[in-house]
Image: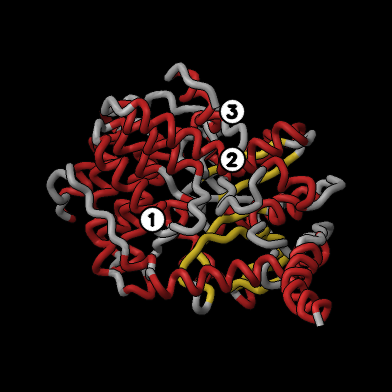
Amino acid sequence: MRKPILFALLAPIIICLGGAVLYNLPPIHDRLAWRVEAARAKVKYALAPPEQVVFVPQDAGGTIAPGQIATAVAATLSAMTPTPTPTPNEMTTPGIETTPLPSATPTLIPTPIPVSIRLTGVVHEYQKWNNCGPATLAMALTYWGWKGDQRDTAPVLKPNPRDKNVMPYEMKAYVDEHTGLRAIVRVAGNLDLLKQLIAAGFPVVVEKGFEVSGEGWMGHYEVLTGYEDDKQRFIAQDSYIMENLPVPYAELENFWQDFNYIYLVIYPPEREAEVMAMLGADADETANFQLAVERASNETAALQGREQYFAWYNRGSSLVNLGDFAGAAAAYDQAFRMYPDIPENERPWRILWYETGAYFAYFYAGRYNDVINLATTTLSRLSDEPVLEESYVWRARAKAALGDTQGAIEDLRKSLEMHAGFPPAVQELAALGATP
């Protein structure tokens, strides 16, 4: 009788251990991990809805009235001398590359292009769990003959597979440092420019908003490889949905606004002058940010609801890159003031996963408590898995500025748990005389 009883006691343990071993086998884990994570997230979000967590700026200044926008923009464009922005390893605003590239004379009369075109040569692949950025970049690189896939890009872009996002500047750095190609990232793009680039043989990576049923708003990358004017749509290689995905012009423009109309172009070094000529004035980084400020400012007066929220956020991100931290902080204040008025099911509560410029603005405007509160609010929305290394670093910087050295060290070490070797965390710890 003892053996059946012993077996009955040990059987559940053996089954659990066996299941754990099978689950962690790569072929099985790749298929099931994202489903398990999605189920966990749904349970957590049902118990503590993240869209209900609201950040309220404490040091915010006065509201900028719509009639004052033009004056503010004119002052920014005419009187401000841009200050150097940090390199990607120093955590600049996401999506903006900071290496100056040759200016180009604007093309006054665009070269006529076909009414439709499809580029071939991109090897499509579906993303593995939480792997949109690495998969999309890998697809874009294959067009230029690069031999690899997301298994090659992911370990560099996301040392921690649970990392929530890959920034465009990280994708650019990968291209520049790990391939024989080059890449440029710019904002304030438009549909005509996208078509010009594609027609010239340059696929374009865009980051845009994305709605998933039951999950809400999030960010997403696509590689645009074609367009069809007669059907008013682009053709995208989408790692989540399908290859050759039709994307209506209006839909792309609407969701592209969520990310300041950002785009990344990969090209061989010998074709750099060709790319710069097509970019025209936007080849110059400062001019590009100035255009983005003006565009976002116009949209704050023309749009409503969530689109107006993104317009204010975009204005803030562009002003950060121009060195106007006080102006950027005021723009972010406007965005965060609007946030509670957005219907809960439409709130972009994941925004700090992708667009961390608000930390930059508040920190360099001397608003350290707002940095801490914003980071804490952002991390609280991911209480079971706060894998946002940037948020820990910014909170640490603010704590250090307020004299909380020990708290800063703890946050920096937490950041390194999320992203081993993360350069900003390593640098900040060294500055505080601490070790990882």
- In the shown orientation, is residue 160 left or right of residue 358? right
Point out residue 370 in the picture as x, y percentages from the top left corner. Answer: 26, 42
Residue most extreme to the front: 1
- In the shown orientation, is residue 424 left or right of residue 312? right
Quadrant (top left, top right, bottom left, bottom right) of the N terminus: bottom right
Quadrant of the image occupied by residue 49: bottom left
Tell me whether circle 1 and circle 3 mark residues in contact (CB < 8 Å).
Answer: no
| Disc 2 residue crowd, few under 14, some 14–19, many 20+, Cα 10 Å | many
Quadrant of the image occupied by residue 420: top right
**Numbered disc 3: secondary structure:** loop
**Numbered disc 1: secondary structure:** helix
Mark toward the start of the polypeptide (2 vs 1): 1
Circle 2 residue? 419
The foreground one among 169 and 252 is 169
Residue pictured at 69% horizontal, 38% vertical: 174
| Disc 3 residue crowd, few under 14, some 14–19, many 20+, Cα 10 Å | few
State how far apart marks 1 and 3 are (Cα): 43 Å
Point out residue 242 in the picture as x, y percentages from the top left corner. Answer: 72, 72
Mark toward the start of the polypeptide (2 vs 3): 3
- In the shown orientation, is residue 113 left or right of residue 379? right
Q: Give the residue type that dot 1 points to.
A: Ser
Q: Give the residue type that dot 2 points to.
A: His
Circle 3 residue? 102
- In the shown orientation, is residue 248 left or right of residue 410? right
Residue pictured at 63% horizontal, 70% vertical: 36
Circle 1 residue? 380
State how far apart marks 2 and 1 are (Cα): 18 Å
Q: Give the residue type that dot 3 points to.
A: Pro
Is residue 281 among what the camera can see?
no
